[in-house]
Image (cartoon, rainbow, N blue to C red):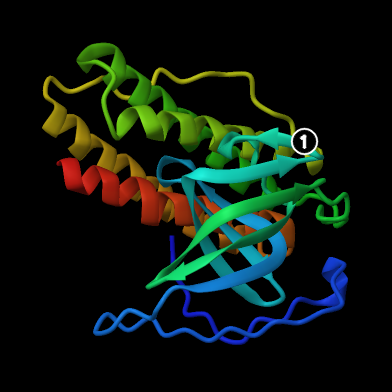
Amino acid sequence: MKFRPLAALALTASLGLSAGVAEVVTTSAAAAPPPRAFALSGSVVGINAPVHQFTVLSGIARYTIMTTTQTRFTLDAANATFSGLRLGQLATVRGIFRARYRVATMVTLRSVPTTTISTVPSTTALTSALNTALSQERYALATYKNVVAKLGAYAPFTNIISSESQHVATVIALMRAHGVTVPTSTTSGAPSPATRTAACQLGVTTETNVIAMYQNGITLAKNFPDVVRAFSNLLDASQYGHLPAFLRCS
């Protein structure tokens, strides 16, 4: 995921808040800023399950939140876990700034807005982009499952399998929202290599292809803001989450 330096943060009335708060921190590697409390509200636009990070869009700024095992979630007045996060939900986050990221100590989630889907009719380009995204996400998921079946359950494959399942579900939700038929065909994925190192190298190749696919898909879906936003989030997850994890183990 991309980490953006935090400039002035204004909680807008469109998010149901009338008060404003401004916090300024630097992200210089030379000297980490002292911990400072923060509170922000916005829409969840990215989820990176393997590293318990998610991204909140507040106004025109994106903020990456790193949760902890002590993070308290409430979802519709009930306790929830990290898996309770959903794209498009409104989130109120409180926590502490630490260097280049924000550590959340409490997250309150509200219902997913019903006005985030484009009303423009689907086009051939959009249909192609969604079908390609679903095909490649299913292929990646099947490939990583093959690795675990052959070499055993180990990181980062176990974590990324969970994330890929969510990616498949996200693309299917977009297809249904835009009236695009969801293919019922399945894929067997790539066969597992014989060693864990080679398996991680296969993961690098797979995620590199996924990244290129989403970069092209964003162009094809440029007239559909909700699809562009979702594709951007999925691209971030592959580029800044999955790919680095595979590079480390390869």
Could you say which is closer to the camera, residue 47 or residue 98? 98
Residue 79's quadrant in the figure? top right
Q: Is residue 224 visible?
A: no
Q: Quadrant of the C terminus?
A: top left
Nearer-the-camera pick, 236 or 58: 58
Q: Is residue 147 left or right of residue 96?
A: left
Q: Which residue is mark 1?
A: 176
Report whether 153 appears left or right of 103. left
Residue at image point 48% right, 36% down: 163
Q: Can I make out residue 162 in this image?
A: yes
Badge 1 crowding class, 10 Å Cα cut-off, few under 14, some 14 to 19, many 20 or more, is few
- Seen at 65% across and 81% down, the residue is 9
The picture places residue 177, in percent across and down from the top left corner, at 80, 41
Q: State the residue in front, 56 or 127.
A: 56
Residue type at the position of mark 1 = Arg
Quarter of the N terminus within the rendering: bottom left
From the top left corner, tell me how far across and down residue 76 is, in percent.
Answer: 81, 40
Q: Is residue 160 above or below residue 230?
A: above
**Residue 56 horizontal/vertical position (percent):** 62, 62
Residue occupying image coordinates x 46% and y 47%: 68
Local secondary structure at mark 1: helix
* Near-viewer residue (50 or 129): 50
Q: With 139 as the anchor, is 198 left or right in this view?
A: left
Res 141 quadrant in image: top left
